[in-house]
Image (tube, rainbow, N blue to C red):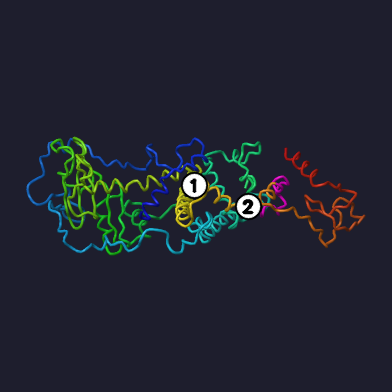
Amino acid sequence: MSNETQIVQWLDEVSDEEQDVAGSDSEDETVNDAAIDSAHDSESEIEESEDIQNISEPSEGTYFLSRHTQRNGPKVKWSKVPPCNAVRTRAQNIIVHLPGVKEYARNAKSPLECFQLFFDREVIQLLVTNTNLYIDKIKARFGRDRDALPSDDTEMNAFLGLLIMAGVLRASHLNFIDLWAQDGSGVEMFRLTMSYKHGEYQISNSPDDIVKRLVEPIKRSGRNITTDNWYTSTKLAKELLTPEYKLTLVGTLNKRKPDIPTEFLPNKNRPPHSSVFGFHNQMTIVSYVPKPKKAVVLLSTMHYDNAIDETTGSAQKPEIITYYNSTKGGVDCNDQLCSNYNVGRRTKRWPLAVFFHLVNVSGINAFVIHKANTDKGITHIRRIFLKQLAAALVTDHQKRRIQLRAVPTTTKKRLREVHDVDETVQQSTAKRGRCSSCPRKNDKKLTSKCFKCHKFICQQHSRVYCVGCRTEESADETD
């Protein structure tokens, strides 16, 4: 079994153990039949329109002509004859990078180690730096310095951990108050980790530029790119074939693309399950009729002939279409996995929306690497993996809160229980100070301090509590 096939199985499978953990949820890890929302229409079938009715059978001759003249060149001639296949393997079809975990990631075992391959120290510091710039900008609005303290790596990791846990619990769209609720309905990890009160892009987002940015890490690797009709074009296909990229492309074409010959569009004279092929400069175009008055048009730089997949029986689908169908579900699968445990909060800020998506995708990639690098175990269930990852990310910040003065005593007590930390007795300082409640004329110098406000206090103005009574009193004050 190839590594690619194994990874797909990991993403698609729903083990019995996972179903036990998730209860009766059937929407866990599988890509179900429900339609996945998309920002654009990926429908590949083209219906017959009035302006192309009554088109005759493909014209006589050795080639088809595209419908319109391109701005930067003449009409495209699509040959009816496939190119000669008796040639050496083309450069773009030579795979030079085998699939699987790269060498530097093979030693990552724990959920945290796998996640930090994507959200490494450099990314965390970038988030901290820009967060602190924003804090500096708004801190003048706060009366106390402690309400606008600068962030650091530990706090940022804790924030990511809470986002991931909210995704695991499918609580990303709940009100924050509900997550921090202390009436038993909230999530303890949130309350223990932190307090509740705690521009324009100059980037081209044309379809071609989006694809070229996304394929940057796999340039010159001999891989194939599958696209839907929003991205597919002959211009993009040609660019991906250049020595800079050495990638092939298979995708559906929108009927409005000028490179499609008129004969390839749907019309009532074309019988169902028939195909028309065209060939031009290492590109193959095919028009297939799945049912009367409809047509599916695809472009491929990976296929060079007019082969029909015999395994499709009477449907007589071209191999280009069966290959496209076998690879087009990758993005839909990723979208489904992201939506299962989505960390995103509702926001109108696009940079924040992009950030949430990066966390989602990094969690999926970390899970794939974890499964590849470790033996099968409980963490091979994605829900358990993400819960352990969230716990690992918040641990350092929770331990640090035990030492903070402003944290409620009940919270500190629970943090010590969770992390098995013994309560250390406050060592009296050698420094002596005047009692904060006595008149200055008394000038009582002593070393004892109030446990809560840490002011110097004498015996006359203080009372002694045992640990249990002090905890009960703190709980009453909180209520």
Q: How many marks?
A: 2
Residue drawn at x 88%, y 52% as measured from the top left: 458
Task: Tell me where the magenta segment starts and ends, as one range.
Answer: 396-413
What's the amino acid at mark 2? Ala
> In terms of secondary structure, where does tag 1 sit?
loop
Magenta stretch mostly in which secondary structure?
helix
130, 295: nearer the viewer: 295
Q: In front of the other: label 1 or label 2?
A: 1
Q: Earlier in the sequence, mark 1 or mark 2?
A: 2
* Tag 1: amino acid: Ile
On screen, 344 above or below 183? below
Q: Is residue 465 visible?
A: yes
Q: Is residue 409 magenta?
A: yes
Q: Indicate whether 293 appears above or below 10.
A: above
Q: Position of residue 312 (x, y in %)?
A: 23, 42
Q: Which mark is residue 381?
A: 1
Q: Quadrant of the N terminus?
A: bottom left
Q: Position of residue 201 (x, y in %)?
A: 42, 53
- Mark 2, residue position: 140
